[in-house]
Amino acid sequence: MIVTFLGTGTSCGVPVIGCQCRVCQSADPKDKRLRCSILVETETTRLLVDCGPDFRTQMLPQPFRRIDGILVTHSHYDHVGGMDDIRPYCQFGEINVYADPIAREGMLQMLPYCFADHRYPGVPAIGLHEIEAGRSFRIGDIDILPFRVMHGKLPILGYRFGTFAYITDMKTIEDDQVELLNGVETLVVNALRFDRPHHSHQLVDDAIAFARRVGAKRTFLTHMCHDVGLHEEVNKMLPNDIKLAYDGQKMEVFG
């Protein structure tokens, strides 16, 4: 499988509008971070994890082919705000979207015109499916195991694909859900910044400790705000097996 980081930033993205900090003014493309999302692809199956407000921009450089499923971590706007922009992909047929009950309800409220009994022409054709943590399913040739993490007090989903696991917006995780990550070799996990604790997001040290707990061979940090620092400088500070991800990065993982 090939994983592409479409976005590695927080809800504000980087640069932040109006900010004059070193990161927001950096000319390094790796310091430009769109809202969090990844593609998971094999030769025959293409999955999108989250569909935020930068979806259109993120997909313009990608080959135009069918999206076989959209996996939703939670229904906050920075993770589902681009759902209307999937319309061009509907020429391949209805697009199946998978979410837990809380995220499903949030999407129904956020995008009611997409799910009305009598939809006006042109709205995206979405098949909305309810999933739950701990119950695996398969799309095409990719096996998917959703698991629960806590975004502050809000339960949301992370996803495991074979030896690869993807987590964003996590603050804590219960022991029984960590057990579902046994054998994960490549981990992607959120790390907001180095200091000033946040009520619903991990910091970098939290993410490093979690990676050690999982025992991943390599870890990539995502969902980073401008306060995390410059990409190249931070990577020199991190352990060799833990690095900041960047927009457009591709990596091979084993399903």
Image: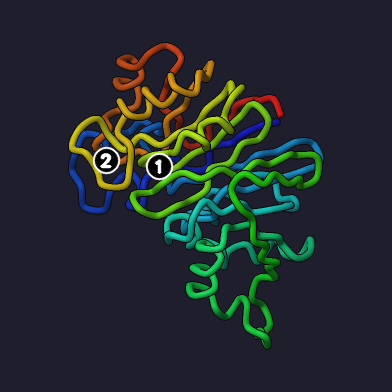
**In the depicted view, which residue is nearer to us: 55 or 156?**
156
Q: Amino acid at mark 1?
A: Met
Q: CA distance from mark 2 to mark 1?
A: 24 Å
Quadrant in which the N terminus appears: top right
Q: Which mark is residue 26?
A: none
Q: Which residue is mark 2?
A: 24
Q: Residue furthest front?
A: 176
Q: Which residue is mark 1?
A: 170
Residue 219 placed where, x, y %?
48, 23
Q: Amino acid at mark 2?
A: Cys
Apparent side of residue 129 relative to residue 104 in the rendered image (left or right): right
Q: Residue at x 43, y 59 (%)?
A: 76
Q: Secondary structure at mark 2?
A: loop
Q: Residue at x 64, y 76 (%)?
A: 123
Residue 209 placed where, x, y %?
37, 23
Quadrant in which the C terminus appears: top right
**In the depicted view, which residue is nearer to us: 32 or 134?**
134
Residue 211 placed where, x, y %?
44, 23
Mark 2 surroundings within 10 Å by alpha-carbon count, few (fewer than 14), some (14 through 19), many (20 or more): many
Task: Name above or below for residue 244 compared with residue 150.
Answer: above
Q: Residue at x 61, y 22 (%)?
A: 183
Q: Mark 2 or mark 1: which comes first in sequence?
A: 2
Apparent side of residue 39 relative to residue 198 in the rendered image (left or right): right
